[in-house]
Image (cartoon, rainbow, N blue to C red):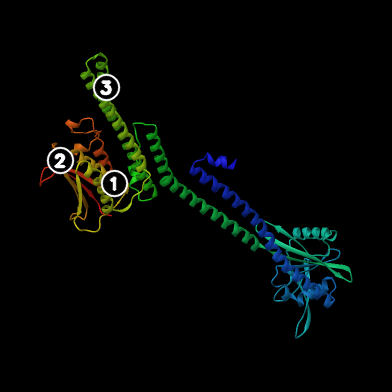
């Protein structure tokens, strides 16, 4: 269910939802932590109370102090320094009557009083003894005393009787902590000791932790909101624009989204936008190329098909043997032409698929060219007496980044083209050199008729062929394939006429690796 819910949310909503879950869990643990902290703080204080109570009981036992006002008064007076760190220590007898209270102990000390509204105190002076009667109003909090007596009464009848018992009292401005314990003497309960301390520091510690948690949560919330804004503004919206851009392309909508503002970014999204736009342009270019190629192929096939149709119609009506042989030759020629066009077209498609899988690497042109030259010499020297020579300018570094078998294909296609225009017993020269820009130049010179075209760039167009005497024997795709492969290698190819003699010069310029 959780995965299904997240799956249907946007990235921003997922981020906010996950942070909400995180905050909820953190809030729960914080609540539990605060619930645990207060009892621990109370426990630490009550432990101190218990130590003092046990110490006080030991002193009462040792001094054999009776639980009456006189003895407790003298005990408190003689041991007042023990209780100076405490807010209040109260003594009750076994009838739950108040017999002593440190609230009535003056620290100068001049007098000690009990809970009575009129207090009598006898003080022994070092110089002389005299009786001093002093009236003093004492505010001990009657409501708290009644509450304490009720608790003592319940404590006396509970199963916890005999062990220390701690409870708290919360008022508007005060948080009091009280620990009580009964006093046994000869296995008989003779009274109770209670320590009451103002524990506002516990409340302050809890409030401080709460404030810290709230401030931290508020700060983290602000950070998350700022991060959400940045995430949405600088990441999610650009991604949405890219998604919309791809959908427009997929649906072939004329109105396209402009992502130029994304391409100028120098981060990963900028690189992604550039890559996506380049990929889209490349795909559109390939689609346009395929459509144009198919159109041209259909156009080229239509002519021999029309010729086939006409020849076949005339053949059925012609009875003369010579005419029928001419028509049959036309039919055979047109069929071969169609077959050649389809074969070359199929080869181009296969090459394009192979090119998408092949990788560029650093290659040396010398052994590649020598291998192709040797193969062609073995074929055409004995067949037509055509010799292919290879030379270089003496430089030893002819390395480029390319695909080896595609370089072989370029050289082979250019040699095929040169041989098709050459007469028997002629020479074709291949020269490799380096220019002033340290570019690698390959020249293929033949001794054919040269180029009659003023614009020699048209010879690299698909299905272009200027062979009146050999019409139909070539598909016109060989040089177009060479042009595509040189473009693939970021190289250029030029068609020139030789300046030293009759013939053509095809020049390829590669960048050095």
Label 1: element kind: helix
Q: CA distance from mark 2 to mark 1?
A: 23 Å
Marks 2 and 1 close (CB-CB < 8 Å): no
Q: Quadrant of residue 161?
A: bottom right
Residue at image location 48% in from the left, 44% down from the top: 12
For the C terminus, the image quarter is bottom left
Report the quarter where the N terminus lies. top right
Frontmost of labels 2 and 1 is 2
Mark 3 / mark 1, whichever is N-terminal: 3
Q: Earlier in the sequence, mark 2 or mark 1?
A: 1
Q: Report which residue position mark 2 lands on.
A: 448
The residue singled out by tag 1 in the image is 408
Residue in the image at 54% along x and 42% along y: 6
Label 2 crowd (10 A; few <14 / some 14-19 / many >=20): many
Label 3: state its secondary structure.
helix
Q: Residues within 10 Å of mark 3 (few under 14, many from 20)?
A: many
Is residue 275 at least partly visible in the picture? yes
Q: Is residue 277 left or right of residue 387?
A: right
Q: Is residue 192 left or right of residue 5?
A: right
Residue at image mark 3:
308
Task: Please give left or right for residue 432 compared with residue 2 in the image.
Answer: left
The answer to which of marks 2 and 3 sits earlier in the sequence is 3
Tell me: residue 107, above or below residue 395. Answer: below
The residue carrying pointer 1 sits among few (fewer than 14), some (14 to 19) or many (20 or more) residues within 10 Å by Cα, namely some
- Give the Cα distance between marks 2 and 3: 32 Å
x and y, in percent, of residue 452 in the image:
13, 36
Q: Residue 85 location in percent, x, y? A: 69, 71
């Amino acid at each position: 269910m959780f995965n299904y819910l997240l799956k249907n949310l946007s990235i921003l909503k997922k981020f906010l939802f996950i942070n909400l879950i995180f905050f909820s869990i953190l809030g729960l643990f914080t609540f539990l932590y605060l619930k645990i902290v207060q009892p621990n703080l109370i426990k630490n204080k009550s432990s101190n109370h218990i130590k003092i109570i046990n110490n006080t009981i030991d002193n009462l036992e040792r001094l054999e102090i009776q639980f009456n006002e006189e003895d407790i008064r003298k005990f408190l007076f003689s041991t007042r320094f023990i209780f100076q760190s405490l807010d209040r220590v109260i003594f009750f007898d076994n009838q739950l009557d108040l017999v002593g209270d440190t609230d009535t102990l003056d620290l100068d000390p001049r007098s000690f009083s009990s809970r009575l509204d009129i207090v009598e105190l006898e003080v022994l002076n070092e110089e002389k003894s005299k009786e001093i009667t002093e009236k003093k109003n004492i505010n001990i909090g009657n409501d708290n005393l009644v509450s304490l007596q009720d608790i003592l009464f319940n404590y006396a009848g509970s199963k916890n009787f005999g062990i220390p018992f701690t409870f708290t009292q919360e008022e508007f401005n005060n948080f009091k902590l009280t620990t009580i314990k009964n006093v046994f003497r000869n296995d008989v309960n003779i009274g109770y000791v209670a320590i009451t301390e103002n524990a506002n520091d516990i409340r302050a510690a809890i409030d401080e932790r709460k404030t810290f948690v709230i401030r931290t949560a508020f700060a983290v919330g602000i950070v998350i909101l700022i991060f959400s804004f940045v995430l949405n503004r600088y990441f999610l919206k650009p991604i949405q624009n890219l998604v919309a851009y791809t959908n427009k392309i997929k649906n072939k909508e004329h109105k396209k989204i402009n992502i130029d503002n994304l391409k100028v970014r120098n981060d990963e999204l900028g690189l992604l936008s550039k890559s996506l736009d380049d990929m889209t342009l490349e795909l559109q270019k390939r689609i346009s190329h395929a459509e144009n190629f198919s159109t041209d192929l259909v156009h080229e096939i239509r002519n021999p098909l029309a010729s086939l149709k006409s020849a076949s119609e005339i053949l059925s009506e012609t009875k003369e043997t010579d005419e029928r042989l001419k028509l049959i030759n036309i039919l055979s020629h047109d069929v071969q032409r169609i077959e050649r066009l389809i074969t070359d077209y199929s080869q181009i498609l296969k090459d394009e698929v192979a090119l998408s899988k092949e990788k560029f690497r650093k290659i040396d042109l010398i052994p590649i060219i020598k291998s192709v030259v040797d193969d062609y010499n073995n074929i055409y020297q004995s067949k037509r007496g055509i010799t292919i020579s290879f030379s270089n300018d003496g430089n030893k570094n002819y390395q480029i980044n390319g695909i080896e078998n595609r370089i072989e294909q370029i050289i082979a296609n250019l040699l095929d083209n040169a041989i098709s225009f050459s007469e028997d017993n002629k020479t074709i020269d291949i020269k490799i050199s380096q220019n002033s820009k340290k570019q690698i130049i390959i020249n293929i010179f033949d001794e054919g008729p040269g180029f009659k075209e003023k614009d020699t760039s048209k010879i690299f167009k698909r299905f272009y062929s200027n062979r009146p005497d050999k019409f139909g024997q070539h598909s016109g795709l060989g040089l177009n394939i060479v042009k595509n492969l040189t473009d693939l290698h970021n190289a250029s190819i030029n068609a020139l006429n030789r300046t030293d003699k009759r013939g053509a010069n095809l020049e390829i310029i590669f960048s050095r690796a």
